[in-house]
Structures are given as structure tokens and as C-alpha cells.
Amino acid sequence: MLDPKMLRENPQALRTMLKNRNFKFPLDDLIDLDNKRRELIVQVEELRRKKNLSALAISHKVKNHVDPVIERKEMRTIGDELLAIEAELRDAEAKFKRSMMTLPNIIDKSVPIGKDETDNTVLRYSGTIRDVDFGLKDHVDIANSLGLLDLERAAKIAGARFYFLKNELVKLNLALIHYALDFLAERGYVLTQPPFLIRKEAMDGAVIFADLNDMIYKIENEDMYLIGTSEHSIAAMHMNEIIGGKDLPLKYASISPCFRKEAGAHGKDTKGIFRVHQFEKVEQFVYSRPEQSEQLHQQILKISEEFYERLGIPYRTILLCSADLGKTSSKTFDLEAWMPIQRNYREIVSCSNCADFQARRLNVRFRDRTNEKTRFVHTLNSTLVATERTIACIMENYQTSSGTIEVPVVLRNYMSGIKEIGKE
């Protein structure tokens, strides 16, 4: 959520942000609602003042043995009016909060202005794309030939975009998870495994809930949802808390399954395990001082880049333009991995600085001293590895002419020394 003061002090900045995001929003209605809300607050305060004065006048007359008939009548009139205005204020406050909670984040000044994903900026390329002299297969064909994947039986019991991983692919999945957790632990991250369910209150603080409602699975008759990413759980971990300044930055590495309906993804990556309803992900999440968040954003990006360099997967780093940004993000980098069969780069990491947007929604603050005014933290998040998507990349980039899959060197110790999947 943004600071409501912006509606009064800098509405043009909000208009510019909405234009650059190519997002339609009833900003004038929200400004009018804010004005009405503040007028009602003044009226309530004035009526409470009058009510207090009437109470004093009644008390004074009673002490002097005078019947305060007129004052009691005035106090009843004031009380009735106050109840009506307070009800109107509660309604205005609720509408104002609902509308404010759907207003997107301010865009960082370094973000390029664009109309869609074609205006994203490629910052750099990393890794070498292999030049092979044999016919490449996609990851599904490779996995089927080696008995590593069963999509048909998964569809029979759960529907499309589910899967059975089998044999060495199960080990590869776990190897990626264990390597990723060790990778972040060595860099000072606190390892966490969050609840796999989340309440609406917590989810609504981490994201603009209306945008995610069609993407997540709800538990019937419960105020609970399956998590779409552990980012939301870790963002809400310190909800309504004041963190000691000396403890910042707080760096969490979180491992969890993720559940997504993938609504709106019809026709995209329908084959295989690149885009599925259930997957595992190791996430970076950081609570930061405002003045350190840009530096930490670059740091968590470099950590993700180094991870894929060590895996030996070619990728490129993208700075998203204004219209392609998620609504909670102020600035986002993506890593896109090379997919040989598609002859294209596909998103594998999203790395965002949300500034104080999530912290305001979740009321997460910090201070250095007990007598100091609190400030909102900044929150940052980045995928380290979404394992099923990365497995697909590994299979296609590490396939051999004999139909086997070489195991990236950094994962071999996590796979009982297996160097090549499918080699007898």
C-alpha cells in the first residue's frame, strides 16, 4: 500500500505511475473519497468535543442542584448525530482502504518506461549456448525415453499440468533443493520452511489479492489458501511487528511447494513440467532498511545469477519495463534461461524490490532505539530456483547424443555421485 499522503501532496506522481503501468484506476474517485473521509474525521472530532462540553455543563448544573434539561436534550441530539457520522466514517474508511489496497506500487526511477514486455531491457548474457551435431529433443521426450516422467497417469489422477517424477529425476529435484539451501546458508540466510496454507489477511498484505484470486487454490469453507509461493508467507512472517534496527537486514531462504491454477496460461507451455500447477521453489526474501534496499536488490540478483552460472545454464538478465512490472514491485529483474528446443530464453527467476509497499500493508516496521519513531522496512524477494522448471532446462541443455543427461558438476555430490542419467 502507498502512503495516503500522496493523494493530497503528489497526485501527479500517481497519475504518472498509472499511465506508465498502462493501468486503469479510478484515481479521482479515490481522491474524492479521501477528501470525504477527512471531512468526516473533522466532523466526528468536533461532535465529540461538543459532547464533552455538554457533559461538563450537565455535571456543573447537577453539582449546583440545577436540572440540566436543555443540556441533556442537546447532548442526545449531538449523540445521535455523532453515531450517524461515525457510521458514515466507518463506511468511508472501509471503502478507502479497499481502494488503496488495489493501487499499484510507485515505479523506481531506473525502470524503463514501456508499453509491454517487448520494451524490457536486456542487461547482459551469461553462459555459452552449445553447438551440437545431433538432433536435440525436448525435455519430455528425453524423460520418457529414460523412464523419468509420467504425465499421463498424473493427468488421470489430478488433471493436466501435473506429473510424476521418477527415478533419477526425483533425485535431481532433491539435489537442486539441497544445493540451493546450502548455497544460501553459506551466504548468511536463515533457512525456513513455511506453512503451506495462508490466511486471506496475510495474503492480502503480501499481494493485491484480487489479482491473485484466480491463480490460487482456496480451501472450501475455510479462510485458508494453498500458497502460490513462500514469498507471501515470509512477507507476512513479521506482520504487525517492530524489528530492531540492529537485526536488519533479515535474510530468509525459504523452501516450499507452490500451488497455482495458472489461469490465463492456456496454450502456454502445455507440454512437460515447465509450467505446472505444483512445483517446489527455494526463495530469497529480505527485510531491509530503506536506504539499503537498492544495494540489497543488486546483491540478491547476483546470488541468483551465480547460482545459474554454477549450474552451467545459459541465461540472460532482463530489467522489466513499467508496463510489465507486477503491481507490488517497484523494480524487477528477470533471469531467462536458454531453452534449446524453443531457441529462446524463458523466465526462470523473478527478483523484485517492493520498497515499503508490502510493509505498509502488513505493518512491518523497525527502529534503532525505543524512543525513536518507527519506519517501514523495505522488502525484497527473488527466486533462487523453481526446481521443475530448472529440471526442464537441465535436461534440454545437458542432453547428449546418446540420449542421456549429464548432471551439472555442482549437483553430483547431492546425487550419490551420479554423473550421467541414463548411462548404464
Image: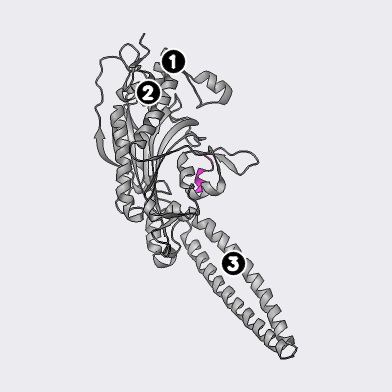
Q: Are marks 2 and 3 in contact (CB under 8 Å)?
A: no
Q: Position of residue 300 (x, y in %)?
A: 33, 42
Q: Which residue is mark 2?
A: 414
Whether residue 321 sits left or right of residue 272 in the image: it is left
Magenta stretch containing residue 208, yes or no? yes
Q: Which mark is residue 89?
A: 3
Point out the stretch of residues depicted in magenta: 207-215
Mark closest to the chain's N terminus, 1 or 3? 3
User: What's the residue type where badge 1 is placed?
Assistant: Asn
Q: Which residue is mark 1?
A: 144
Q: Secondary structure at mark 1?
A: helix
Magenta stretch containing residue 300, yes or no? no
**From what the image shows, is residue 192 above or below residue 81?**
above
User: What's the residue type where badge 3 is placed?
Assistant: Leu
How far apart in space, not on screen, are marks 2 and 1 (Cα)?
23 Å
Judged by depth in the image, the label closer to the viewer, 2 or 3, is 2
Q: Which mark is residue 64?
A: none
**From what the image shows, is residue 99 above or below residue 305?**
below
Q: How is the image coloured?
A: one colour
Q: Position of residue 21 (x, y in %)?
A: 39, 50
Crowding near the residue tagged with mark 2, few <14, some 14–19, many ≥20 C-alpha atoms within 10 Å: some
Residue at coordinates 32% horizontally, 33% vertically from top-left? 307
Depth check: give the residue in front, 329 or 49: 49
Judged by depth in the image, the label closer to the viewer, 2 or 1, is 2
Q: Secondary structure at mark 2?
A: helix
How far apart in space, not on screen, are marks 2 and 3 (Cα)?
60 Å
